[in-house]
């Protein structure tokens, strides 16, 4: 602190100019935005000093001032007082009374208090007692991005404050779809921002894009419940990332569910994500559990859904699909002192909402089946209570084939269940049946439904229809049996259809054939290349053939039967149903 006090006080000398400016500057303010503070001693203070013997007037003449100059020292021009001169023996040092000294001390103390109060008012909230700044000389290189938290119960303020304690200039972005309620108690400083990602009528488009809020090279995705405690953790992660070998680095959070490494294979064609044990404990495709994940901002925001929740699920599905590895580092981040979701009700609510979000993001990213270690399966597609995953098929080419995908696994599961059920009903009723068309081709080639097929075809003897109660009922209209399957006469022609449910129209078609002069024929023909007559001897006898998880009946010499219908080499040369529209080998 520096105090500038004009001319030296001598007993009986005037104060000089009427307005005396006291300028105080702290060394800590040299490069800060607080600047300099100046105060002017008011007229009341000057009058008080005059009462104590420090008289002076801004209008005093040089002659008047000169009366108090030492003998032989003329008044200085334009100085408002006497020039400096060595003190002779008749002039001793200035002598102050106790009252004068007390007043001077009180003025100085008041000015110091004024300065300190002004300085505090300009400090960032919660910025006192921060640790020393750690980072590059150019400023922080990492933006802390908080996305995974529950608005109704969280420790986000503690999380944010812990990083600001490490570096008061640390950029922090808290991202939410809508304005959190109850409101988050975040510091009101420029480097802490709340990003609302849901578009709104009163905000520009850029406000809903998370990259708008990030100006650093790296981003650290920090989950709720984490806290920065050890100095330099983010810089350590940056150094590990720059060392190469992985596109992401992560550090576990020392919670009840710390992160662990997993291998992850994502097959978009099969709509499936398969998790398994990672070969190495510190380098893998994905993490399961709580972790701080750091990556380059350009990598994060080049993902199609960079901040979809749950962040861990969506992030690693997208990065694993691109072949990006993640390296798991030590030491872990500390847990929050007051962990979120401490009550049983809060945990139940958070888990319920997390399940809903997870199902939504998996569907949005095109994942219908998740396979975990040990064989546990999670299904996220259609069911008996929902519609099937695709709409009306045009030109024998379902929509998913144009997306370079095959039949969703949930649909294949429903087809297998329906086929097994229908075959069981037919066998119990004594109805002779056999695998037909693409279903026989799938049994011969895969032992299952063709991976891109969308229905199951069975041939039946027309004369056996009366043996089956469900088929007799379907002659008069739709019949929903005790298992929820729908038996009906197809609107396209004289054949039967069994649907998975009233909502889900995945189905098995039953084609009634009858013999005529040793040739099996029927009354309804569709424009399918395999829809042709064939000799009855292929059905005498029928042979068992594994199909869709059970054993079905099939024509004998089914290879010749298939080549009669589809052409030579059909088993060894797979093709889409209508190659004129879309070919397996060459696209559309």
Image (cartoon, grey):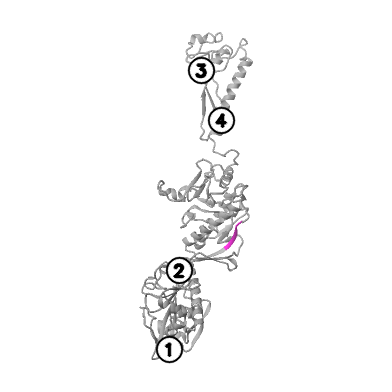
Q: Earlier in the sequence, mark 2 or mark 4?
A: 4
Q: Which residues are magenta?
A: 258-262
Q: Earlier in the sequence, mark 2 or mark 3?
A: 3
Pointer 3 local density, CA inside 10 Å: few below 14, some 14–19, many at least 20: few
Query: How far is mark 3 from mark 1, CA to CA?
Result: 123 Å
Find residue 90 and report its image quarter: top right
Query: How far is mark 4 from mark 3, CA to CA?
Result: 23 Å
Q: Position of residue 292 (x, y in %)?
A: 57, 53
Question: Which residue carries the number 3 mark?
Answer: 43
Would you say 2 lies left or right of 528 here?
right
Q: Which of the labelled discs sits on residue 117, or is there none?
A: 4
Q: Earlier in the sequence, mark 1 or mark 4?
A: 4
Determine whether the residue tagged by mark 2 lies in a helix, strand or loop: loop
Front in this rendered view, residue 56 or 397? 397
Query: How far is mark 2 from mark 4, CA to CA?
Result: 71 Å
Q: Which of the labelled discs sits on residue 536, or is there none?
A: 1
Query: How far is mark 1 from mark 2, CA to CA?
Result: 35 Å
Q: Residue at x 52, y 15 (%)?
A: 16
Query: How far is mark 1 from mark 4, CA to CA?
Result: 102 Å
Pointer 4 local density, CA inside 10 Å: few below 14, some 14–19, many at least 20: few
Determine whether the residue tagged by mark 1 lies in a helix, strand or loop: helix
Prevailing secondary structure of the magenta residues:
strand
Question: Which residue carries the number 2 mark?
Answer: 504
Numbered disc in front, either 2 or 3: 2
Q: Position of residue 561 (x, y in %)?
A: 43, 85
Q: Earlier in the sequence, mark 4 or mark 3?
A: 3
Q: Is residue 38 above or below residue 361?
A: above
Query: How far is mark 2 from mark 3, CA to CA?
Result: 91 Å
Front in this rendered view, residue 88 or 369? 369
Q: Position of residue 282 (x, y in %)?
A: 60, 59
Numbered disc in front, either 2 or 4: 2
């Amino acid at each position: 602190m520096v105090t500038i006090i004009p001319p030296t006080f001598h007993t009986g000398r005037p104060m000089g100019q009427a307005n005396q400016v006291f300028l105080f500057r702290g060394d800590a303010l040299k490069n800060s935005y607080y600047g300099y503070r100046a105060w002017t001693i008011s007229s009341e203070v000057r009058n008080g000093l005059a009462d104590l013997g420090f008289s002076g007037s801004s209008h005093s003449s040089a002659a008047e001032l000169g009366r108090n100059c030492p003998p032989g020292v003329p008044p200085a021009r334009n100085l408002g007082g006497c020039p400096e001169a060595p003190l002779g023996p008749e002039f001793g040092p200035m002598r102050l009374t106790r009252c004068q000294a007390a007043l001077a001390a009180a003025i100085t103390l008041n000015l110091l208090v004024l300065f300190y109060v002004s300085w505090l008012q300009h400090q960032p909230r919660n910025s006192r007692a921060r640790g020393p700044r750690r980072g590059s000389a150019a400023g922080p290189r990492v933006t802390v991005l908080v996305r995974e938290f529950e608005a109704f119960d969280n420790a986000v303020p503690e999380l944010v404050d812990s990083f600001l304690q490490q570096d008061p200039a640390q950029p922090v972005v808290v991202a939410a779809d809508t304005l959190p309620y109850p409101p988050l108690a975040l510091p009101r400083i420029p480097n802490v921002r709340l990003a609302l990602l849901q578009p709104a009528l009163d905000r520009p488009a850029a406000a809903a894009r998370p990259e708008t809020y990030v100006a650093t090279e790296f981003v650290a995705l920090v989950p709720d419940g984490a806290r920065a405690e050890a100095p330099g953790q983010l810089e350590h992660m940056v150094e590990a990332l720059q060392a190469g070998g992985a596109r992401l680095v992560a550090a576990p959070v020392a919670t009840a569910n710390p992160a662990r490494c997993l291998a992850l294979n994502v097959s978009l064609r099969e709509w499936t994500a398969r998790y398994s044990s990672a070969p190495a404990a510190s380098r893998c495709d994905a993490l399961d559990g709580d972790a701080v994940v750091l990556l380059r901002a350009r990598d994060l925001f080049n993902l199609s859904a960079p901040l979809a929740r749950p962040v861990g699920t969506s992030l690693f599905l997208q990065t694993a699909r691109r072949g990006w590895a993640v390296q798991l580092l030590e030491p872990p981040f500390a847990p929050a002192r007051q962990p979120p979701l401490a009550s049983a009700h809060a945990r139940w609510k958070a888990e319920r909402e997390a399940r809903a979000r997870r199902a939504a993001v998996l569907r949005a990213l095109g994942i219908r089946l998740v396979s975990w270690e040990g064989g546990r399966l999670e299904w996220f597609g259609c069911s008996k209570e929902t519609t099937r995953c695709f709409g009306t098929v045009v030109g024998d080419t379902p929509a998913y084939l144009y997306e370079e995908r095959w039949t969703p696994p949930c649909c294949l599961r429903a087809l297998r269940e329906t086929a097994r059920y229908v075959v069981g009903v037919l066998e119990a009723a004594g109805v002779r049946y056999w695998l037909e068309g693409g279903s026989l081709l799938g049994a011969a080639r895969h032992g299952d439904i063709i991976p891109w097929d969308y229905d199951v075809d069975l041939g039946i003897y027309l004369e056996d229809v009366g043996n089956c109660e469900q088929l007799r009922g379907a002659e008069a209209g739709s019949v929903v049996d005790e298992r929820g399957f729908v038996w009906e006469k197809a609107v396209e022609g004289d054949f039967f259809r069994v649907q998975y449910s009233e909502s889900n129209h995945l189905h098995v078609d039953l084609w009634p054939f009858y013999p005529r002069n040793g040739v099996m024929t029927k009354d309804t023909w569709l424009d399918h290349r395999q829809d042709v007559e064939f000799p009855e001897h292929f059905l005498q006898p029928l042979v068992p053939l594994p199909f869709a998880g059970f054993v079905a009946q099939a024509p004998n010499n089914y290879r010749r039967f298939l080549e009669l219908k589809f052409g030579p080499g059909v088993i060894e040369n797979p093709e889409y149903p209508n190659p004129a529209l879309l070919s397996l080998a060459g696209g559309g």
